[in-house]
């Protein structure tokens, strides 16, 4: 049995930890009063948790919060950020003046934390997402950096209702992340009423235990109890630790403590003096100044820039192959040139071909099981501080499961990459539940995203290479159906660049297609060619940004006649991207072929015909425009 | 203590239940072999569970599967539907010929179940969603219909990794749904590798217990154990029951049982005879024919058609009010005219104003806590068989959390309504995590959806009334910011109809706006008017379907000059909807004002100005077009 090396904090330390907690409360009140919005009561319940973490437990550098070897802190209950900002004021990293810019135009100290602040790795504020991100950071620490730094995540009790939290709980215990500590701030009160479990800390503990965590109930306002349990967490091996802290919302705030009705409300001017006076009265000279523990410097810098395919794509022109097969190949090739490329998949690796990467680099593949939200959260966490290049794969349809996480990824300034296989009706017999027909719309609407839709295996290899080097969220749309190889290894692809496959003087209509509809458009080209009708054929490749100049130029050359054809619903897809791009132009008439109405199980060719996005439909549309 | 009324099934019954299970296996193999795709091994693991449920436990009418008083069955592991279809063959409701149309063009027996089939209430196939829907159905049974029918939900073990399942588990125990039974088919094997927990049925049981369920481990292939545990489930009061069934994937399939590598694969022709011969050898004459238990006829029909506001909207013109306030009022008004209107909210009711409905009709409000996926699942379940009219509310941004559920809602042919409050940058200081800027794009891309964007409190009341009577998924976009009342109680609104607010001969530009940007456009109108520049001003109201004729007509009257201005990202929003609608027209030049780049905390007016969607930006854009 291990000797318990724990030593109680001395009375001065206890006094000062309590002082810090109450100063955090005071500053949370002052900053939210100044901004006239924010969450002082939610800040107040976690004040001791923060004081103990920041001045007794965590090892970090006050002046270099993003130091590679420093412990990480994720505030999943992002609305309580005034307390976190106040904690950094206590460290000396932030000034009181900076704190008082909370929520102001131009201030990095926003209403919910974002990585604009140097001590924030991931944006929070959509509840239930912080733990998954923390889990990703802990995974990197334990298995990739193999470093001493640890990860702490503070959750609210309200957000424990979010399933994403339980996905993260299951993942963390499965991967034995003993460098991870989750603290649940059980303050009993939600926004509009008490939480479902109130102060039943035993229920949270049992749930965490059932999900494989070392779990303990503590008084969240007792710095002694908190100190001991964090020590025990560090001693616990092969299991993450969950600290279930019973707290009071509005703790030490006269007239508000443990009372409903004060969520998200700055202290009323009439109560402010009394509350502040009481809090100031709790603070006295402790005779000690606390500072963070020293960082163990054992994390090395890494280089994740300029990632290349180890060899150019090499396929036989005209051969039919599914783009998803090219995805697996491409991942392996970039993995050969950069050892920080990681593949995450949600029990679909034999369908997405991420299994090729697992085979080549078993230590750089992470099975996330059927939990897409957590997979994305883990990916975002892994990509923080540029430690890894993350590729996430599953059926494109199931990425919808993680749309809020993806949206928040943009707020996180994350650089993660998605491969969504099995797009559209062309998957055939599995039916509509498995068909991604909203995925382009969904990813296009994400801030600063890139959307690539490779039509053959060459293009998908290049898309993977481009994504690995492109900032922001990149989505690569992949298909189940085999499409013919139309490019050589020498073809150049770029973000924002379409490919003009067929073009000659006298062409009557420009057709813009992608994926399986490019295959159909090539058939239509031959049919029309046989009837003496020339068409210009463009492979869209980059859906966002879209190559407006190429498409507009081609359309103008074909008398303004333009057809878009896609295996996606009409709203927000390729046709929409082109219509948006050309909305400021006149003289172009665009006809949109897209999936209209709910599809069903059938053979791919039957569906392409029934929903009028096949070669016959393209031929018909071309003729109708002439 | 209650007397245990359980009686063991007689030996003939046991024999026949086993016969049925093996016939289900045979038919699952035959149908998937015919379609050359599908999941015979996943079907095989749950064959005894289905035979016991359908021929020993459930009360239903073979000829009227949707009978109001019949027990409900949800197959959350939708890919195993060949087994479910085969069970209905056993009941006599389906023919062998129908079964053999599995996955064929024109057949309702698709690769995953949908409500095209009369014995299916909700589509499944995106894993982890069935339980939430079943929970919604059970809630209706217990608290609304107050009927005897019960709800059974079969889950796969792989999908237990989905957080949505745990959201549903927490909800079901909180609301004491003792008319609900979940069965986990723990067959150990996922698609691409074993599940995280394998055959550790004790872990599943402990998790279910920790989430408040009566929970039991059984041998999922023993019809005796299954019979007893379902009986015990019926006896258990105030708690839902979770049956953790240890099973073998590919049970009784020679060479495949409990082996990896056979997921989603029809039996190979070379193995088929041996497997079928073995299965047929297990079947013998039992001397008994089993039929379902008799339905307790205690559920009454309800009328949810032609729902009206109990009184017309009545507000002072020009007054500034937030549309979310009108939402609460409107809900109460339709609740007064129809007692089957239900409001669901995710601990945001004081922000969305759903609290008004709770106050008026406490029994018709359901607090779903911070678990948006489950809230949507419950809503879909509640709306099945037209039992209720469901309105779901939270911040619009957080509806992204449930996008996959919403997408599947369309596959379910559901008729649920969403109110998403707090759209756009105009919420101000809370920052980007709380700002819905992708919501229009997201909801527009849902099949057969309706998207309404009311600009004042009158319009929102009418939007609620329209949504209550409109099939499919309806999304109403609401705002935190107050906007001026521009309509009277007599103004007529319709799905697909815009409102022309200002129009006169000689107008130079048409401006299409919505919500807060309509307010800004009205200011711009006055400014421009003062400078002698007339503009036509259109309130879009119906974003999907968009009122193409009105917008096109107006734009033509203003020399083809058109501006769209919106508090949404450019991709997929109002500008995109208009550009899509007009893509087939020529002679129109559309300029799009939208949110470009990641927003941040600041005052609403500062953000509207910084992102150039305010009155000044509209004035500037109008002048730039002249």
Image (cartoon, coloured by chain):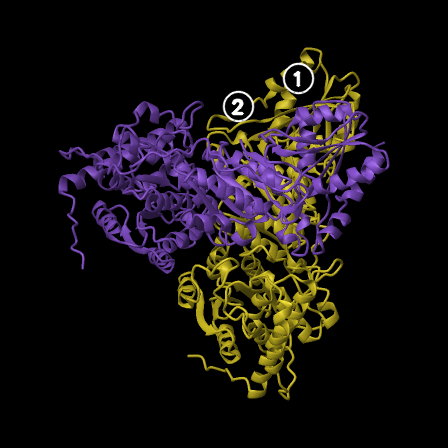
Chain colours: A purple, B yellow
* Disc 2: host chain: B
Vertical placement of residue A323 versus A60, above or below? below
Residue count near mark 1 (Cα–Cα under 10 Å), binned few <14, some 14–19, many ≥20: some
Q: Nearer the viewer, residue A541 or B286?
A: A541
For image coordinates 85% across by 36% down, the residue present is A623
Name the residue furthest top.
B531
Residue count near mark 2 (Cα–Cα under 10 Å), binned few <14, some 14–19, many ≥20: some
Q: Nearer the viewer, residue B504 or A429?
A: A429
Vertical placement of residue B348 versus B118, above or below? above
**Label placed on residue B24:** none
- Any part of residue B310 in sight: no
Q: Is residue B240 left or right of residue B64?
A: left
Q: Nearer the viewer, residue A362 or A384?
A: A362
Give the residue pinned by disc 2. B605
Q: Position of residue B354 (x, y in %)?
A: 55, 45
Q: Position of residue A469 (x, y in %)?
A: 49, 32
Q: Is residue B86 left or right of residue A31?
A: right
- Any part of residue B116 in sight: yes
Q: Position of residue B617 (x, y in %)?
A: 60, 19
Query: Distance between the Cα atoms at labels 2 and 1?
Result: 18 Å
* Disc 1: host chain: B
For image coordinates 80% across by 18% down, the residue present is B505
Q: Secondary structure at mark 1?
A: helix
Give the residue pinned by disc 1. B526
Label count reads: 2
Image quadrant in which the N terminus of chain B is located: bottom left
Q: Nearer the viewer, residue A160 or A117?
A: A117
Q: Quadrant of residue A326?
A: top right
Q: Secondary structure at mark 2?
A: helix
Q: Which callout, 2 or 1, points to the residue nearer the camera? A: 2
Vertical placement of residue B277 versus B316, above or below? below
């Amino acid at each position: 049995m291990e000797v318990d090396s724990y030593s109680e904090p001395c009375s001065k330390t206890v006094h000062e930890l309590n002082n810090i907690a109450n100063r955090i409360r005071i500053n949370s009140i002052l900053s939210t009063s100044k901004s006239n919005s924010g969450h002082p009561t939610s800040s107040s319940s976690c004040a001791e948790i923060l004081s103990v973490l920041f001045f007794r437990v965590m090892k970090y550098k006050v002046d270099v919060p993003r130091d590679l070897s420093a412990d990480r802190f994720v505030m999943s209950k992002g609305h309580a950020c005034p307390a976190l900002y106040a904690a950094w004021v206590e460290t000396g990293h932030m000034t009181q003046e900076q704190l008082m810019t909370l929520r102001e135009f131009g201030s990095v100290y926003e209403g919910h934390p974002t990585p604009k602040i140097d001590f924030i790795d991931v944006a929070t504020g959509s509840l239930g997402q912080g733990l998954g991100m923390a889990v990703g950071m802990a995974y990197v620490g334990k298995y990739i950096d193999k470093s001493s730094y640890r990860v702490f995540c503070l959750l609210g009790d309200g957000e424990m209702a979010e399933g994403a939290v339980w996905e993260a709980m299951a993942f963390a215990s499965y991967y034995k992340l003993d460098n991870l500590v989750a603290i649940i701030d059980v303050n009993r009160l939600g926004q509009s009423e008490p939480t479902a479990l109130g102060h039943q800390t035993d229920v949270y503990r049992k749930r965490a235990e059932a999900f494989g965590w070392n779990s303990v109930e503590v008084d969240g306002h007792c710095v002694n109890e908190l100190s001991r349990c964090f020590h025990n967490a560090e001693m616990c091996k092969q299991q993450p630790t969950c600290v279930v802290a019973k707290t009071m919302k509005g703790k030490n705030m006269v007239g508000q403590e443990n009372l409903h009705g004060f969520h998200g409300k700055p202290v009323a001017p009439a109560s402010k003096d009394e509350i502040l006076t009481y809090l100031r009265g709790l603070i006295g000279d402790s005779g000690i100044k606390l500072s963070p523990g020293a960082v163990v410097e054992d994390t090395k810098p890494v280089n994740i820039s300029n990632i290349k395919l180890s060899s150019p794509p090499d396929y036989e022109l005209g051969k039919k192959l599914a783009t998803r097969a090219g995805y697996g190949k491409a991942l392996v090739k970039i993995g050969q040139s950069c050892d920080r490329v990681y593949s995450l998949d949600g029990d679909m690796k034999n369908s997405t071909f991420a299994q090729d990467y697992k085979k080549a680099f078993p230590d750089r593949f992470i099975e996330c099981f059927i939990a897409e939200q957590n997979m994305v959260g883990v990916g975002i966490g892994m990509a923080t501080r540029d430690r890894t290049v993350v590729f996430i794969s599953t059926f494109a349809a199931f990425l919808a499961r993680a749309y809020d996480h993806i949206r928040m990824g943009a707020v996180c300034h994350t650089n993660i990459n998605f491969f969504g296989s099995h797009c559209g009706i062309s998957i055939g017999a599995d039916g509509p539940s498995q068909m991604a027909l909203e995925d382009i719309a969904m990813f296009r609407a994400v801030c600063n995203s890139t959307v690539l839709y490779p039509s053959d295996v060459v293009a998908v290899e290049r898309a993977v290479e481009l994504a690995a080097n492109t900032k922001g969220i990149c989505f690569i749309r992949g298909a189940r159906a085999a499409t013919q190889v139309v490019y050589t290894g020498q073809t150049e692809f770029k973000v924002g660049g379409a490919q003009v496959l067929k073009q000659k003087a006298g062409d009557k209509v420009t057709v813009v297609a992608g994926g399986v509809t490019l295959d159909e458009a090539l058939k239509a080209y031959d049919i029309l060619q046989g009837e003496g009708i020339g068409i210009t054929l463009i492979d869209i490749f980059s859906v966002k940004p879209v190559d407006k100049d190429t498409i507009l130029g081609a359309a103008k050359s074909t008398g303004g006649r333009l057809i878009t054809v896609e295996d996606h619903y009409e709203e927000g897809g390729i046709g929409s991207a082109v219509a948006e791009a050309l909305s400021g132009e006149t003289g172009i008439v665009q006809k949109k072929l897209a999936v209209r109405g709910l599809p069903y199980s059938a053979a791919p060719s039957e569906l392409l015909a029934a929903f009028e996005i096949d070669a016959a439909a393209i031929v018909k549309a071309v003729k109708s425009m002439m």
